[in-house]
Amino acid sequence: MKYFIETYGCQMNVHDSERMAGLLEQAGYEPAPEAATADVVVINTCSVRERAEDKLYSRLGEIRDTSRGTGHTPIVAVAGCVAQQEGSALLKRSPLIDVVVGTRSLKQLPQLIGQALVDDAPRIDVNAYEDVSFPLGVARRQDPVKAYITIIEGCNEFCSFCVVPYTRGHERMRPKRDIVNEAIQAAAEGHSEIQLLGQIVNHYQAPDDPTCDFAALLEAVHDVPGVERVRFASPHPRHVPMRLIEAVRDLPKVCKHLHLPVQSGSTRILEAMRRRYTREEYLELVDTVRAMVPGITLTTDMIVGFPGETDADFDATMTLTSAVGYESMYSFKYSPRPNTLALKRYPDEVSEETKTQRIVALQALQKEIQIELHEHTVGSRMDVLVDSISRRRDWELSGRSFGNTVVNFPGPREWLGRTVPVRVTRAGAYSLAGVLDSRATEA
């Protein structure tokens, strides 16, 4: 039997899909090239934003229509955050669903599918299992260069807009030994970049080593033979101690890029969001990081239209964006999420029209900032880790700089996974273009 997994949402969802693929292959399934030819279709969902849920129901309708046309009806499993959030309600809304498996029940997926196949009855498991272990070597990594490694499951912050604590559960730390062993195996398989994942990675404290905080974990992964680069996502701005900044500065393989999700530039809105830092404290952190790690690139997340956001609050977001000068930004319109404090406490009083106007203005400003930052790099040399082949031009490669900027340049496919020196020749809003720096290679 063949399986196909579709993934929506964050990097953790991508890695969860890699884990589910490995579990299914261990159980005897083979990957299918597309959903239409699969016997089992797994939809790994996200519920951070309302539109992500809409994608699920839209996709279920497409699968139903395809089945009617071909006469082939696959087993459909819904996994991820929407599965955890909605549970049995999904089965009531869509009779097409055969299996619902929550974020903490992924290891039950093959068994649930097997049961659904045997008795033709839907199966559901959204139990809150505490076990965060995962068999070493089972995950089927999709990226030939990057290897995702989850270090923390869940979140304890309970920001008022965020559904993650309700879908992923409270924080559970993976043992240091499991993380390091997974990095060793990934590097041995040729993955030269390790990306450590967690809802808040800088909360990490090893349950098997009281001396190992997140900075110490970075040191341990940094020292794994074969690892060329280490990245992580996402830290919380109020948990960035000097020790972590020093690790980013002093460890050569740790990329000089820090994602600092601010969410708003207004202290009043930050308080309503339960972010527990002020605008001034955030800007002070930015100044400290840049002073200690010269040349570091900063990225962020931003929400517009949070309940009660006034024109003055939005102006504060715009001025903070200009003051920091982010390399890139993920920006979203606020949407109410189930179970969250914001849904219970604040009416969604900012109109959709106003939200749209604000997101357009913010994204236009951020685009201007990125163009200006990128133009300053023209003529400079960057070490680029090649991580993909261009889909448009088979003679072009794509990779990322140490600061996480996308760089495109001509080169052979054999360079995939290699770090090569590139001279930047052209700047765009979202990426750079360049050529191999022959002077560096000759030297």
Image (cartoon, helix red, strand yellow):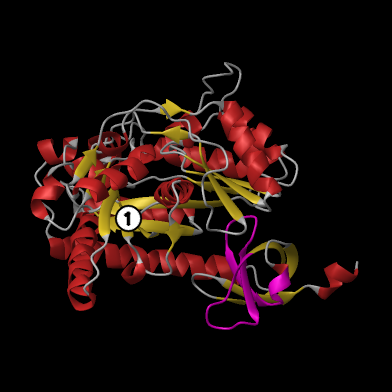
Reply above or below: 223 against 33.
above
Picture residue at 34% right of the left edge, 38% below the top: 108
Question: Is 34 or 129 nearer to us in this picture?
Answer: 34
Horizontal placement of 413 versus 333: left or right? right
Q: SS at mark 1?
A: strand
Residue 406 inside the magenta-drawn segment: yes
Q: Which corner quadrant holds the N terminus? A: bottom left
Residue 391 inside the magenta-drawn segment: yes
Can you tell which quarter of the image residue 407 is in? bottom right
The answer to whether any part of residue 16 appears in the image is: yes
Picture residue at 65% right of the left edge, 55% below the top: 402
Q: Position of residue 27 (x, y in %)?
A: 44, 46
Disc 1 marks which residue? 42
Question: Is 223 or 296 nearer to us in this picture?
Answer: 223
Query: What residue type is disc 1 on?
Result: Val
The magenta region covers 387-414
Reply above or below: 326 against 249.
below
Q: Position of residue 83 (x, y in %)?
A: 24, 45
Residue at the extreme front: 118
Q: Position of residue 256 (x, y in %)?
A: 63, 48
Dot 1 crowding, Cα within 10 Å, few <14, some 14–19, many 20+ = many
Q: Position of residue 378 (x, y in %)?
A: 66, 73
The answer to whether any part of residue 242 appears in the image is: no
